[in-house]
Image (cartoon, rainbow, N blue to C red):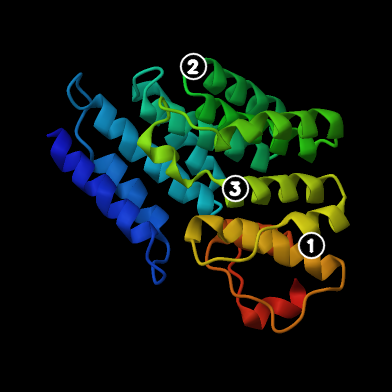
Amino acid sequence: MPQGVRAVTELLIALDGRPDTRDLGTLAVRAFRAAPRPTPATAEAIAELAEVAGWILFEEERQAEAHAHNLAALALARPGGDVATLTLLTMAMQRAHVGRFAEALDLADRGAAGTRSPKVRAMFALRRARAHSRTGRAADALRALDQAEAVLEADATAPPWAWWIDRTELLGHRAAVLANLGRLEEAAATFPADDDLRFREVVRAMRYRTLKALGRWDGPPPTFRSPRAVHAATGIPGVRYTRRDASTA
């Protein structure tokens, strides 16, 4: 039974990575609702399904549903396990995204306290930095960024899913923090070059918005697929953004 649930989760992850995927959140919600009643043998697999659904809904700016699925994942997941840790990482980011900064900081602290991995603790430091920057607490945000430098150190205890946190990702977070603090010149100089990795689309959107604010964007506006990236690019949540919409950005 867990294998069947995990197969559905893997399908959602695969679809989420495809450039032609649209409105995957509805399918993710249906998949979670159709999951069997949790048992000790299936709870972790169903928690992972809820966590993936929560992430997809977060990206689609369906924030109330994202939060509900994250809570479900956390209730089912083994404390301190990979699914619980990933859920706390997503929740800390999602709560900051909707302006619940105290919750975001509490979740980041909870996640950092529950892991042995310095790399994962550094990932939670990035969540703290982003939340602090949204409230203008520059000293706290920059201190958390300095703590996050540990993501680049060798860590034999790091889980396999932490592969994506690297120098490019760290620079993206640092630039986002600087932009949130109004230090646009520093942010523009810090953003990494654009790449085609979908999970960095929000960073590309923030880079676009920063350069546009400074009057330095050359060429046609980019196209973004993720509604959360749209929000980052335009400041308008819950809408899709294409070249046709560029004049409103």
**Is residue 194 visible to us here?**
yes
2 or 3: mark nearer the eye: 3
**Quick one: label 3 or label 1, which is nearer the N terminus?**
3
The answer to which of 127 and 171 lies nearer the viewer is 171
Q: Is residue 44 above or below residue 14?
A: above
**Quick one: label 2 or label 3, which is nearer the N terminus?**
2
Q: Residues within 10 Å of mark 2 (few under 14, many from 20)?
A: some
Q: Is residue 13 above or below residue 165?
A: below
**Quick one: label 2 or label 1, which is nearer the N terminus?**
2
Give the distance between the C-alpha atoms of the residues marked 2 and 3, in whole angstroms. 24 Å
Q: Which residue is mark 3?
A: 167
Q: Position of residue 27 (x, y in %)?
A: 33, 54
In the picture, measured across the screen, residue 113 lies left or right of residue 160, that is right
Q: Which mark is residue 124?
A: none
Image quarter hosting the N terminus:
top left
When asked about the image quadrant of residue 215, the answer is bottom right
- View extreme (left): residue: 1
Q: Which residue is mark 1?
A: 210
**Which three-letter amino acid code belongs to the residue tagged 1?**
Thr
Q: Position of residue 188 (x, y in %)?
A: 79, 60
**Which three-letter amino acid code belongs to the residue tagged 3?**
Arg
Q: Position of residue 240 (x, y in %)?
A: 58, 68
Q: Position of residue 106 (x, y in %)?
A: 63, 21
**Is residue 238 visible to us here?**
no
Q: Which SS class for mark 1? A: helix
Image quarter hosting the C terminus:
bottom right
Q: Which mark is residue 114?
A: 2
